[in-house]
Image (tube, coloured by chain):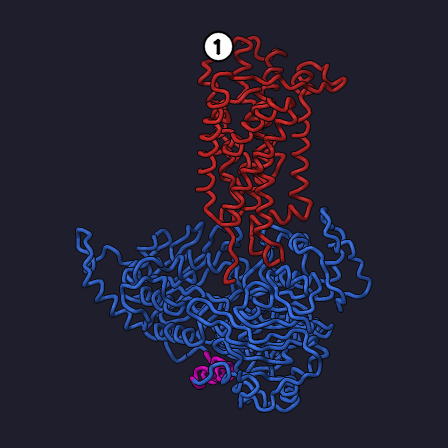
Chain colours: A red, B blue
Amino acid sequence: MSGILSPEFLSALISGMVLAGMPLLLAGLGETIGEQAGVLGLGMEGYMLFAAYAGFNGALYGGSPWLGLLAGLIAGLAAALLVAILCVWLRLDQVVVGIGLILLGEGLTSVLHAVQFGDTSPRLPSVPGLAIPGLSRLPVVGDSVFSQPVIFWLGIVLILVVHLLLRSTRWGLKVRAAGDRPEALDAAGVGVTRTRFFAVLVSGALAGLGGAYLSVVSSGFFWPFMTNGAGFMAIVLAMLGRGRPVWVGVGAFLFGACVSMATALQLVGVDVPTDAVFMLPFLAVMTALVAFARRSYLPAALGVPYRREGS
Amino acid sequence: MEHTGAPRTGGALEGTRTQPLVRLCGITKRYPGVIANDAIDLELHSREIHCLLGENGAGKTTLMRILAGLAKPDAGSLVFEGRPVLFRSPGEALAAGVGMVHQHPTLVPTFTVLENLLLVGGRRCAGEPWRDRGSRSRGLLGRGFRLPRKEAETAFGELAQRLGAPVDPHAVVGRLPLGQQQWVEILRALWTGPRLLILDEPTARLAPQEAAALLASLRSLKDGGTAVVLITHKLREALQVADRITVLRAGRVAGVIGPERLDAVRASGAEEPALLESEIVGLMFGERGVSAEELELAGAGRARSRSTTGRAPAPALPPTPVVLSVRDLTVAPRRQEVGLHSVSFSLRAGEIFGIAGVDGNGQKELAEALAGERPVRRGSIVLDGRDVTKAGVAARYELGLRFVTDDRLGQGLIPSLPVSLNLMLKRIGRPPWWSRTGRLSRTALLREAERLIQAFEIKTPNPEATAGALSGGNLQRLILARELADRPRVVVYLRPTQGLDARTALAVRRRIEEMAAQGVAAAVISTDLDELLSVCGRIGVLYRGHLLEVVENDGPGVEYKIGGLMVGAPMGGRLAAGADLDGDGASEELHNRERAANHELTSQPDEPTSQGDESTPRLG
């Protein structure tokens, strides 16, 4: 156990934390926006799988990770468009549509993957990092934090952007009103359907980025069911974050650390059964839920389709 | 259309002194099974307060929802400033200059006051009359991305000051008392500077003082050039402020009383208003005729009966034994509640004890704690000498403690079950209706159900009909039947006439009095002060979870005293400014108009002149 605090271990832990935490962060931010608007994005897992698949194809055939991320964003947007039409416009049950989307995402991407890459299993080249001058030479954090690809920094900036969006713009005010008391938004002369519709699209786009990050940046290839519950963790993060993006970020990287623990421990030769270590993130989710679920605050109208009374 | 031809209104043709701001022509709106509006014509003028009067279900709210873009008419047209319009959403109506204050709360409770206003944005209409001076709020006009908090705060300050509304812009709305929330609703409706302001029963949940202050500021708004529509079922309130009154009945215009008539009535002596009152009551209730009871509801009669029979304590009778005694009752607050803090009182057999208070001051907490539906943190509830603080709902029912809830379809009944089973909900499993093995005897059940249906006059096609299909009045009769059956000792009524029409409400009050005459003690928790004054012997006031002073309902002046306690100010304290409290005759009212704005409440209550008919009449 001597190597547990060695620079190698910490460096591996932190870079693994970023790789696993980024998709959670992006999807968690997306889920936050959707939930604040009153639409439960239960289909997160579906968004992410579609986006991971599309992102992989984009990066593979487009030859650039940026094209991959863009393809993922568009795939997430498209899936969200479907959800927005069904749940917001046609007012279908959000749980049913969400589960449907998860199953669709799992099934469709598995089949497409088998048909397309069943024999070849191509890999993407790893995404080059952006070495920050000076800082990237620091011990431990130099390699793990200050040599990350640009998209990492974009993700960090997104925390702030979503925070400002929700707190200090009129759009954010509308979104939060749509989730808390849609009648009030309606009475204030703002369309509830329109507000929720756009919130779901933004939510899907962010989740799409998260999914694409998973296949394009984190792993470099795609395999069926690769999200492995990340979509659900994003939902939990959004609920525990209570609409505050900073807490979603903190939570995402904490879960990321749990995921990367297994690899980091192996790296320094500590022999822990991998199955046990792989359980860590889920144990962490459960612990967090038990500890903080009482304090989780959900918008009052979450999951309730809005219909104006007596119109 | 009969509105101008209604014989009772005499020369009440509307004088077209000015071009109307809004003209509604032949508005018709149907809902499944009802015609809410049946070819209604209506004209609204700037610089006028137009009162819409009518019973519950007369179509007042529906008509105004159409005007505010919340409902689409099936037929008819809307002319706004000479141009035909159709508002497809509240946003369009707002943009055109129609603001509405709804009956139910429409603010986001987790937002601050300012955020609620910013939600509306700042699309102000041109020619806003009462903020013309130094309107620096141009920044608000922009629909930019960033929230113009600073500019909004300045604009809010101006607006609130103009209205005399003491509201903190940074307070979270859900934590404000209801009276203040009502102000915020009004401020929001005025935020865009509407040409027309519609208020749907704005005083229903306010203490008398707050209501008076509100009416005073409506007058100053009107003088500033805004057209105001006031939907109300309080006749006296309408006579106090209206420039024009339209009475709706069953979706049609039953009559219009124009400004000339109202001015004339206010100018003439004390006799004339009473005449107009009974005429309007006639219009509201129509061919059914006006019974003594309805007149009583309209105010005149009730005040008289109160001062003669005088609800004064009857010293001749020996005091009856105490059946319920509540000591130091404390309940933890839930989200957006105030809880209860050391509430103590006792009830004697046959007594009707009233608990007044503005909604949201602990009424539900008290009722549920008494009924056993909510854990008690501290204190005791003793029923007939037995401590029932720890007893559950069923045990308390058994001992004769009953609860008539205001949440009829939620807490009160199971809408999907038949009437018969709902009547027996609290006696499930008991013989003779259920056997010892738990088998239900259908014949015994139906026999009992039919007995109760008859005794309580529940209108249902048959005992097996689903309870959810009954009308509001019949739902209440069903709950009364269940709770008052089988030897009650103490009954807790929570807002027993909430949402009921005048006739049913009266029947419910009669029922409460009948039960009391049989020796059943009653705790009537109501936000309707007039109701409490008409049935209760003593009245306590709930304020922020505390039971303030218990007042004997022994005649004139009680209303002001209770009203003061309801807003948290004991007698003599300085209350909301600008309130002309009483409705002491319309002519007096006219005199007071000028000085109403800076009139102090405290000068009023002791004057013995404002006694007889100060109660605000209610019609439904």
Do we see residue B179 in this rendering? yes
Question: Is B310 above or below relative to A189?
Answer: below
Give the percent coordinates (x, y) of residue A218: 58, 21
Give the percent coordinates (x, y) of residue B394: 31, 55
Q: Amino acid at mark 1?
A: Asp
Tell me where the magenta segment starts and ends, as one range.
B288-311
Front residue of B177/A54: it is: A54
Write down the quadrant of residue B288 in the picture. bottom left
Does B390 appear in magenta? no
Task: Look at the numbered disc 1 and give the secondary structure of its residue.
Answer: loop
Does B296 appear in magenta? yes
Question: Is B142 above or below relative to B5?
Answer: above
Residue depicted at x 19% and y 63%: B444
Mark 1: give few (<14), some (14-19) or many (20+) Cα within 10 Å.
few
The chain containing the residue under callout 1 comes to A
Question: Which residue in the protein does label 1 denote?
Answer: A271
Q: Main secondary structure of the magenta part?
A: helix
Residue furthest to the left in view is: B436
Residue depicted at x 57% and y 82%: B611
Give the side of residue B162 with respect to residue A310, left or right. right
